[in-house]
Amino acid sequence: MLDFTATFAVERTPLETFEAITNVRGWWSKEVEGVTDQVGGEFNYHYQDVHHCRIRVTELVPGRKVAWLVLDNYFNFIQDQAEWKDTRVVFEISEIEGGAEVHFTHVGLVPQYECFEVCSNAWGGYLGGSLRNLINTGEGQPNLKGIGNTPTHQHMAAELRGGSSRPAIGRADTGEEKD
């Protein structure tokens, strides 16, 4: 079983990268409620009627690592609602020439899961688009509160839910580096 992974480089320091990752409202969703930047903190993510989850921050090492535990989860497009429950989301940050590299792993999100295609596609959009932009430019493209413009990666996830062909973005389940 291969956990979903993605790796990307940014043009900021590891500490700036860490600070952007913990600013979950700046890159994932404006509808995040709760504490995202303290170990033991819990937050709720919500995207329309499609996805909501409760997450606990389990590790924060400034400039090096952010880790979360998914406590509860709901998707409106799968049968087994336990697919994300008790999975871990890990951001490992390392210094590289000219900036930092982020290695993301959603431990427990595996190709055998019904949600894998949609989730890996959405993670690809959030990571390679919104989070990378937040780190590099200070402007992410998180989901907006209520009804508003939907980020591009959500359009692609909706197409997948509707059965159209798989886009190339976010397919990093083999551990290969993706830009």
Image (cartoon, helix red, strand yellow):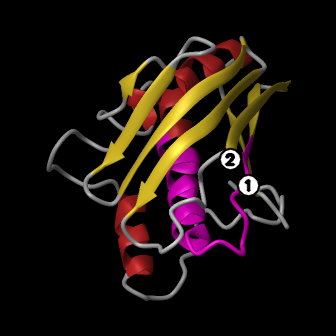
Q: Vertical placement of 167 versus 128: above or below?
A: below
Q: Is residue 141 visible?
A: no
Q: Is residue 115 magenta?
A: yes
Q: Residue at x 44, y 24 (%)?
A: 138
Q: Is residue 153 visible?
A: yes
The numbered dot on residue 134 is none
Q: Quadrant of residue 39?
A: top right
The residue that mark 1 highlights is 108
Please state the horizontal and vertical placement of residue 36, each as a whole percent of the image.
Answer: 50, 20
The residue that mark 2 highlights is 87
Please state the horizontal and vertical placement of residue 172, each as a whole percent of the image.
Answer: 73, 62
Q: Quadrant of residue 97?
A: top right
| Nearer-the-camera pick, 169 or 137 | 169
Give the magenta part as a residue range: 104-130
Q: Is 56 on the left or on the right of 161, as rendered?
A: right
The quadrant in which the C terminus is found is bottom right
Q: Quadrant of residue 153?
A: bottom left
Give the mark nearest the N terminus, 1 or 2: 2
